[in-house]
Image: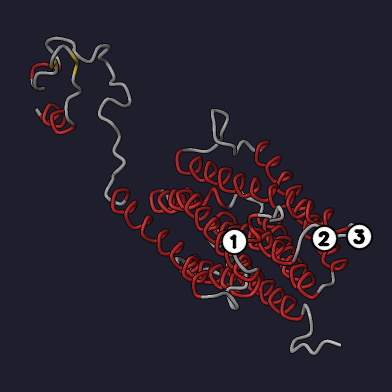
Amino acid sequence: MSAARPLDTLAAPEQRAQAGTLGMWVFLATELMFFGPLFFGYWYGRLQFPDAFAAASRETDVVLGAANTALLLTSSALMAAAVEAAQLGARRIAVRLLGATAALGVVFLVVKGVEYHHEWQAGLFPGDASVLVTGGRLFFLLYFAMTGVHALHLVIGITVVAAFAVAGAGAKPRWGPGQLGLVGLYWHFVDALWIFLFPLLYLLGRSG
Amino acid sequence: MSARKHRPYRRALRVWIGLMLLLAATTGSAWLPLGAWNSVVNLVIAAAKVLLVAVFFMHLRDAGGLVRLVACVALFMLVLLFSLAASDYLNRHIDPAPWQPPRQGSSSFGEPGQLSLNVPQTVEHGVEVIPEPAALADFDCA
């Protein structure tokens, strides 16, 4: 017997790909449970302090928020195209698209950092120096917690996508389209979270 | 020569255009004075965007039943946990505690001859027990 890799003996390649996809979806389901309490906290606070939440939401920078949403949606489209390119065997195109995806993620984080900086200077960060009262403080506590945890996920996503771009650039690729598809699932999940965060945190109370 | 049904990247481009239009719609509608319907519009548009991402970018369209089931069960669990948590939180009320803010004119809460006249015994097993709000209300009326 040769020293076969354990996974090779486990199942047919197609079955392994299915198992990987299923495992990633189960992981994303646990991620949803992880974010759930933050969304519940938001919902509770909004019912409890509707006016304070609307007023606090107007303090966020909606232009930068919308621009960041567009950036992230575009990065997701590029990621989907990268997975498609890898499936078609166009690895060079896939690597370039991965690089662009990671770059858009970095730009998102820079914009978010500028927002954080403005909000810190405006005294919106929860704490003794906060200019806000109960409901508004709760809003900005959730704002920083939700966007912060989202940014952490994005950092992980950027790292993995950049690593795949580097690992795919050589003469012999170190990943296949199946593995890249799993990275894509994670990236799109982080994008989907932001799709909900944007209207909840930035668009509330704009017409009031 | 490959005989593909779709030209490559065409679908990703279409979905991206759809996402951008929905982003413009959700941002623009936020300034319309629709009252509570602003939130409804925003959430419906967000759900539509996530559905586009999940179905096309995350390949739920081509996924097997098992993967779709996991995605649906995750959402169902979230709804379940929201409902259970709501049964607690929606039945809570934020009332100011009776000893906040400090009462004017009385330096000590348990001063003899003041509160102890009408408020029930406040010492149990050597530990000072804060009177119930109802007891304080009775005291104020008297």
**Residue B31 location, x and y as percent?**
59, 66
Q: Residue at position x 50%, y 49% from top? A: A34
Query: Numbered disc 1: what chain?
Result: A
Residue A200 lies left or right of residue B87; in this view the side is right
Q: Residue at position x 88%, y 58% from top? A: A169
**Amino acid type, mark 2:** Ala
Q: Mark 2–mark 3 contact, CB under 8 Å?
A: no
**Amino acid type, mark 1:** Leu
**Amino acid type, mark 3:** Ala
Q: Mark 1–mark 2 contact, CB under 8 Å?
A: no
**Residue B119 location, x and y as percent?**
11, 22
Mark 1 is surrounded, within 10 Å at the Cα level, by few (under 14), some (14 to 19) or many (20 or more) other residues, namely: few
State the residue in front, A31 or A169: A169
State the residue in front, B89 or A105: A105
Q: Residue at position x 23%, y 15% from top? A: B109
Which image quadrant is residue A168 in?
Answer: bottom right
Residue B20 lies left or right of residue A135; in this view the side is right
Query: Numbered disc 3: what chain?
Result: A
Which image quadrant is residue B32 in?
Answer: bottom right
Task: Please say if B45 is above or below A8.
Answer: below
What element does badge 3 sit on?
loop
Comparing labels 3 and 1, the label whose residue is closer to the camera: 1
Give the residue number, with chain letter if any, for mark 2: A100
What element does badge 2 sit on?
helix
Of all residues, the one furthest to the right in this rendering is: A171
Give the residue number, with chain letter if any, for mark 1: A10
Quick check: do tags 2 and 3 share a chain? Answer: yes
Mark 3 is surrounded, within 10 Å at the Cα level, by few (under 14), some (14 to 19) or many (20 or more) other residues, namely: few
Comparing labels 2 and 3, the label whose residue is closer to the camera: 3
